[in-house]
Image: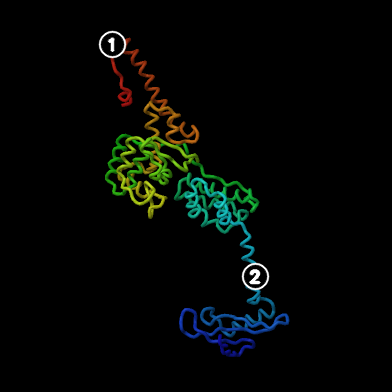
Amino acid sequence: MPVQERFKTKYAGVYFVKAPAVGSNKSEKIYYIRYRKNGNMIDEKAGRQYQDDMTPARAATIRGLRIEGKEPTNREKREIEKALKQVESNKWTIDRLWQEYKKNKPNLKGMHTYKSAYKLHIKPYFAKKEPKDILPLEIQRVKNKLLKKRSPQTVQHVLEQLRRIINFGVNNRLCQGINFKIEMPKVDNVKTEDLTPAQLERLLKAIDEDFHPHAGPMMKMVLLCGMRRSELFRLKWKHINYEHSFIELVDTKGEVDQKIPLNDAVKEVLESLQKSNTPYVFPGKNGGQRVNIAKQVNRIKTAAGLPKDFRPLHGLRHTFASGLASSGEVDLYVLQKLLTHKDSKMTQRYAYLRNETLKRASNLAGSIIDDATNGTDQKKVVNLEDRKK
């Protein structure tokens, strides 16, 4: 490399060389300073004329500060930066803990959902922080911000995921934990949703009139067999057994793969779908696993004139369960198995529907006695559904 010509300035120990400016062919001065410190002669760059807005006077000021030891030399700056990077690399931040957490739990059920939640709701706020540096107020601010757009259940899942990441670090002695309890938002898990016959009729009409190839069929699937949204997203053609009439549910909420019956109505929905070159029944972008369908199902909900607070997919799961419970023909144990609830507690929310049906059936006995007492000889066939009306 040829030696560049040096040009002196009126300031002692300050000179410059000429070179093309960064990003253009325009000539630019690059200022250097030369001085002695601790017996060593130091020759280093002070800055560029345009890029750093450097002048001979500023370069001279920098030279004076470095001679007096009030500002580190370029070499010292590099060593400081290197040391800081080393310190940073040794920190177990939330992001580093998350990466290690994923490595140690490669087969964790629902990992796709966890990855998405981390990227959207945890990484933007806590990625560079060590757990010990997280303040209660920061957690509260994030919780309040999420609650403006997300359900309490979703926010609870996000905060629980953050807590698991921190606990993973603490349990493996990688870092200090937080010294406070993360307060979870209150979630109403007892809420059930149902549709009247008129609402259901409008919904089915809106589904048939909608143009999306998967939104309507997914809603019908939930209504006919009670599958969860996440189970529909993960459903592959290989999970459907037409020969023995069952659907295999993998990575279920109960963390155990399960099977549910494949009834004739669900078969019709599946047979109406146009298969593409993807293993998923309801594929997402580029044929991969779908992660969202909210916009499409909400459009159908609106077209059907359903209540604003009705959740298009989860609400239909409740409708499926409520219909079976109120029929009087399905006991809660069978309903629990169809809904793939891990225990009976979640299924108990539908007990009142079955009890009401049994109560109506029991009241028929009183009606029959009354008819006999009043001398009614004509035999009657009582239709339970007519009594409901």
Q: Quadrant of the N terminus?
A: bottom right
Q: Nearer the viewer, mark 2 or mark 1?
A: 2
- Say what amino acid the circle numbered 2 marks: Ile
- Report crowding for label 1: few under 14, some 14 to 19, many 20 or more residues within 10 A (C-alpha): few
Q: Nearer the viewer, residue 58 or 5?
A: 5
User: Which corner quadrant of the image does residue 11 belong to?
Assistant: bottom right
Give how far across and how far down residue 89 sits, in percent: 61, 62
One can see residue 319 in this view: no
User: Outermost residue, front direction?
Assistant: 243
Label 1 residue SS: loop
Position of residue 262 in the picture relative to residue 66 (left or right): left
Residue bearing mark 2: 80
- Say what amino acid the circle numbered 1 marks: Thr
Q: Is residue 334 above or below residue 110?
A: above
User: Which corner quadrant of the image does residue 358 belong to?
Assistant: top left
Give how far across and how far down residue 128 sits, in percent: 57, 59
Q: Is residue 57 above or below residue 122?
A: below
Residue bearing mark 1: 376
Residue at image position (50%, 33%) is 343
User: Which corner quadrant of the image does residue 127 belong to?
Assistant: bottom right
One can see residue 21 in this view: yes
Q: Is residue 132 above or below residue 255?
A: below
Position of residue 110 in the picture relative to residue 357 (left or right): right
Q: Is residue 227 above or below residue 335?
A: below
Q: Nearer the viewer, residue 73 or 223?
A: 223
First in sequence: mark 2 vs mark 1: 2
